[in-house]
Amino acid sequence: MQKHLRTTLATTASAALVGGLLLAAGGTAVAAPSGIQGDFNGDGYRDLAIAAPLGKISGKSGAGYVAVVYGTKNGLDKSKRAIISQATTGVPGVAEEGDFFGDRLTTGDLDGDGYTDLVVGVHSERIGDSDSYGVITVVWGGASGLKSAVDISAPLPEYRSELGWDVASGDFDGDGRTDLAALNNSMPGLNIFKGPISRTGKAAGLVGIDTLDQTDISADKIIAGNVNGDGATDLLVLGQQQSDDDVYPTRGVLYKGGKSGLKASSKVAGGYEAVIADVDKDGYGDIVTGNFMEKSADEPNGGHGGAVTVTYGSAAGLSTRTPVRITQDTTGIPGTATKGDRFGWGLAAGDTNGDGYADIAIGAPGEDTGSAIDTGRVTVLRGSAKGLTGTGSISFSQNTAGVPGVSEATDQFGASVRLTDSNRDGRAELVAGAFAENEGAGSVWLFKSGTSGVTTTGSTSFGAASVGGPTGLSYFGQVLAG
């Protein structure tokens, strides 16, 4: 099968919620967790996980790790951090060369205790001495942050071909419990671990979905979100359509969530990245798909500068409204579409100015600066009553006034992006990663947001050493989650 390259405090059963406090079995009162998505320690501020999948751990190159920076009233605070790897106490496994721990991440409250958990798809992890690969490591959130963890492995051999190739969480059957979706590289390609998932790693059930048989798509990427506004999370599946002529065009299918689980429904624009967010504030999630290879509406192999496509949501699922295709040649968007820009490689959604509309950050890590190739750029598009347009959009590179650093060849600034409200002021800040910065050491940039959206004022950058991580080749910032 062809795959496209892209890398506690346990609440006891007798605990009771009283006046905003949890009364534990021993009688000690502790603050109740916030229940906010992305809040690992329950203090009410969203946190950030930063992957460094090529990081050297215990002397093993490419073992990988995840750096966690916690949110505070002043935003993300590098002094409040943790490094998580397979050499961390409480985390299963052994740091080994080529595990690439961290190159697949998602978050969700899998055990229902109010704390967000971190999910790592370790698809390169070899299972014992077998020919099977792939486990999913769940690092449990708690009042003291991310501490203990458990591995979830598939019960049957056919599920064990790079399990954790991609991961996403959501309540896919609408029962109020968070489920975990995971891809592997064999049939069935999509596996749903039904929530709750216990601290021992046992799921309430396991359902396999053969996306290739149902949709003719070899699944490569999954994105969770609520498109039709009901009580169940939907799942967008992106991948390559099977072909007899070795073209393998990218395609997308929306699986609608419901009481009976996920069911394939509508075709969606293909791509290699996507987010689901309400960009027109009508109460329905809109699908923004990024295809950095896009050349035309038919997307044959090759590619120009890349594009994003907005497919609007409705109560019925996908809206009858014509999808909107946006490139760097779209009116109002800074720059010019040039072959190799990879516009749409990275995508993130969040409300950057507090107006209630989801905005979209778009990474173009292949953007050149003069003769320097692949320096990278991030563009933020504004959501509005008209949907996503170029009006009011703004872009940033390392050469933008106020942004730390200098645009250098092959930095690939914007290969990862995240919009997150880490200081709880109602506005999402921009986080941008450049995994190739400093010959592959990698760095991330933090941009603040105000009433006008993302600003360079007060922007900062940091690498692995600033959060206690191993230095050198690591691809720090290749993946962001929270």
Image (cartoon, rainbow, N blue to C red):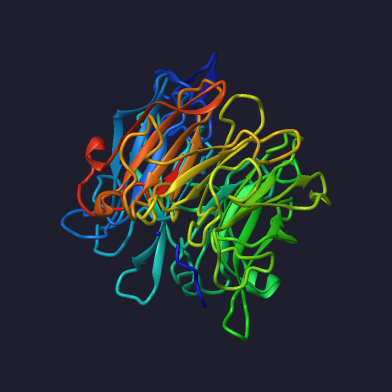
Q: Nearer the viewer, residue 370 or 87?
A: 370
Q: Residue at x 46, y 60 (%)?
A: 164
> Is residue 290 shown above or below 4?
above
**Left or right: residue 466 compared with residue 27:** left
Q: Residue furthest top?
A: 19
Which residue ends up furthest to the bottom in the rendered image?
244
Q: Position of residue 327 (x, y in %)?
A: 61, 52
Query: Between residues 359 and 107, which one lies in front from this camera angle?
Result: 359
The extreme front residue here reads 370
Task: Give the camera-side residue of 31 and 39.
Answer: 39
Q: Position of residue 57 (x, y in %)?
A: 21, 53
Q: Position of residue 163 (x, y in %)?
A: 46, 65
Expressed as whole percent of the image width and height from the top left, the position of residue 71 reads 41, 27
Above or below 212: residue 201: above
Q: How many marks?
A: 0
Q: Give left or right: position of 109 versus 300.
A: left
Closer to the camera in the image, 26 or 203: 203
In the rendered view, would you say 408 is above or below 401? below
Name the residue located 34 percent from the left edge and 45 percent from the top edge. Answer: 407
Q: Is residue 481 visible?
A: yes
Query: Image quarter for residue 301?
Result: bottom right
* Residue 210 visible, this angle: no
Relative horizontal placement of residue 88, taking residue 14 as reference (left or right): left
Q: Is residue 277 above or below residue 440?
A: above
